Image: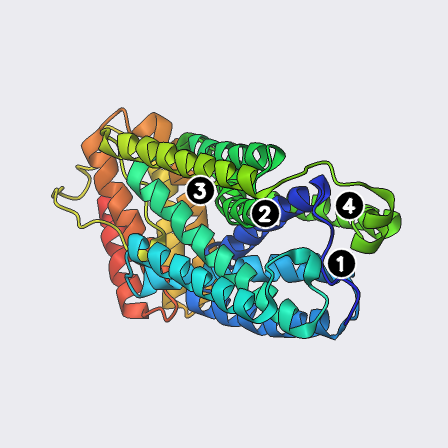
Amino acid sequence: MLLSKVPEVTVWFWVIKILCTTVGESFADWINMTLGVGLTTTALIFTGVLVVVMGWQLRLDRYVPFVYWLAVVVVSVTGTLYTDILTDNLGVPLALSTSVFAAALVVVFGIWYSREKTLSIHSINTVPRELFYWLAVLVTFALGTAAGDWTLELTGWGPGVSVLLPAGLIAAVALGWRLGANPVLAFWLAYILTRPLGANLGDWLGSPKSDGGLGLGTAWTSVIFLVAILATVGYLTISHNDVLEDYDRTHTPTVTTNRVRERVMLAYYVVVAVVAAVVLAIAAAQPHTAPAAEEETGSAPVTTTFTPGQATAHFTPAEVATFRTITRDTLAKVQAGDQAGAAARITDLETAWDHDQAGLEPMDSTAWHYLDARIDEALTAVRADNPDPVTEAQRLTTLRGDLK
């Protein structure tokens, strides 16, 4: 038996949990796409980091804020990457991966409960229980990623709107807990929902303003949230406000429950789930544009044909010249064997194109979508896990011709 290896579930717990999810998502995107490392390589890197950090966490005999929350960040990134690999590299539908991860979580909880007779995080004071806990956390991140992405795929919601559903569901779960719902059930429901909330919050902050975001970019979003995490963890390290043993000595439970009330609140959660499903069904039935796929998945096939120079005929020459210059520079770096430089340079094209979307698309929507697909093809080729210089050169040469 050890001292508790996890923190008390206070408001600080949820604040850091959301911060960790957001910075994990943004940091992984920065390494994967901005630095051009690639999805598979990024996943391998973080798997190695996960092994090291989890080894550190398991060797401790009590809760240490820095190590615990570092483990949460790394598990967040790793679980997200595993889901992205299934979706982007292996083509597994999000509906299927969501169902599989949900079933896997049920299995983990079933084995955990049959062995330990409890799923409460207040009982994480033995090595087996801690192993079950971290396995469940990993699966919840993968499930939250798949469910969140599936929701966006169904609805086509933008970064800002997409924050509202998980935030509303978490509020409903918290209300149920306050009214007497089973605290263990409420905890794990909220824990799963914080994953899409944190990821959508990160997308909202980092996405270009033309896409409905705040335009901070993944790098700045990661830095801001990382500083917030470090400040909060530093405060908790000094104050010990989230140490379970200290908390239990100084606080009394604020929520009481009984079996009858738990059953009533379980029915309430079912109603909330039905309402959420109806909202998603209504949103999915509305005309909308599907969210843009990640570059690794490729873009939709180009069905419209333009002659060189025709696609840019209605666009501002200065903006087109900028796109053409970046494309030429990227092609030169590919031909020189500078893959890292090419990946960095083509990010400038992505940024400039997204920035100018609001002005260009109304000028000629058909041409804009045509060029957007061509740019996505070039991005996919340059950012591939194993880039082929011939394919990269072909895509960039084609794009340069379209930008005349």
How far apart are the alpha carbons under marks 1 and 3? 35 Å
Q: Quick check: marks 1 and 3 in contact, CB under 8 Å?
A: no
Inspect the image, locate mark 3, and give the three-letter code of the amino acid beneath it: Thr
Q: Quadrant of the N terminus?
A: bottom right
Which of the two marks, 4 or 3, is nearer to us in this view? 4
In the image, 155 versus 312, the foreground residue is 155
Mark 1 vs mark 3: which is more N-terminal?
Answer: 1
Q: Residues within 10 Å of mark 4 (few under 14, many from 20)?
A: few
How far apart are the alpha carbons under marks 3 and 2? 39 Å
Residue 106: mark in rendering:
none
In the image, 23 versus 350, the foreground residue is 23
Whether 75 is drawn above or below 173: the answer is below
**Which residue, given by chain and number where applicable, does mark 3 sit on?**
351
The residue lying at 51 percent from left, 49 percent from top is 192
How far apart are the alpha carbons under marks 4 and 3? 31 Å
Inspect the image, locate mark 1, and give the three-letter code of the amino acid beneath it: Phe
**Which residue, given by chain and number where applicable, does mark 2 sit on?**
187
Q: Tell me residue 370's x, y (percent).
A: 21, 41
Mark 2 vs mark 1: which is more N-terminal?
Answer: 1
The residue lying at 79 percent from left, 70 percent from top is 61
Residue 66: mark in rendering:
1
| Image label count | 4
Mark 3 vs mark 2: which is more N-terminal?
Answer: 2
Inspect the image, locate mark 4, and give the three-letter code of the amino acid beneath it: Ala
